[in-house]
Image (cartoon, rainbow, N blue to C red):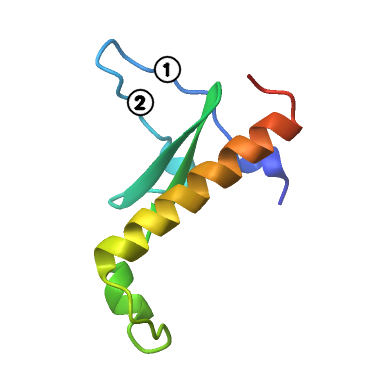
Amino acid sequence: MYLWEKMAVVPIDERGRLTIPKELGIRNTRAVIILAGSFIVAIPLPENPAKKAEGWLKTGKTREELKRLSEEHAREDAVSRAKRRGQP
């Protein structure tokens, strides 16, 4: 499978909404949206991430702490990648 087979150009309406084509296979889910310079990154989430990680993820941090840390690291990573690609 080629990368462009999982890409799409979609319009964004006046309310900031966009429709993801069904061919991309992302339906009936939630996603993390990260603003990274002049583009966005959407990362689909499993139905219940805490339940999925319950058996293998051991930590003393609260869910809120983990969420804050993951969003912070994802944002830093996205901005870093954008800068390496020469994005504003």
Q: Is residue 28 left or right of residue 12?
A: left
Q: Amino acid at mark 1?
A: Pro
- Residue 53 appears in view: yes
Q: Residue at x 67, y 39 (%)?
A: 81
Residue in the foreground of this view, choosing between 42 and 22 = 42
Q: Quick check: 42 above or below 47?
A: above
Q: Residue at x 54, y 26 (%)?
A: 39
Q: How many marks?
A: 2
The local crowd at label 2, few if under 14, some if 14 to 19, many if 20 or more residues have their Cα within 10 Å, is few
For disc 1, the marked residue is 11
SS of the residue at dot 1?
Answer: loop
Residue 55 locus on image (x, y percent): 36, 89
Residue 15 found in image quarter: top left
Q: Residue furthest top?
A: 14
The answer to whether mark 2 and mark 1 are in CB contact below 8 A is yes
What distance separates the C-alpha of mark 2 from that of mark 1? 6 Å
Q: Quick check: 61 above or below 9?
A: below
For disc 2, the marked residue is 18
- Residue 46 appears in view: no
The local crowd at label 1, few if under 14, some if 14 to 19, many if 20 or more residues have their Cα within 10 Å, is few
Q: Amino acid at mark 2?
A: Leu
Q: Residue furthest bottom?
A: 55
Q: Quick check: 66 above or below 78?
A: below
Residue 87 locus on image (x, y percent): 67, 23
Q: Is residue 37 left or right of residue 18?
A: right
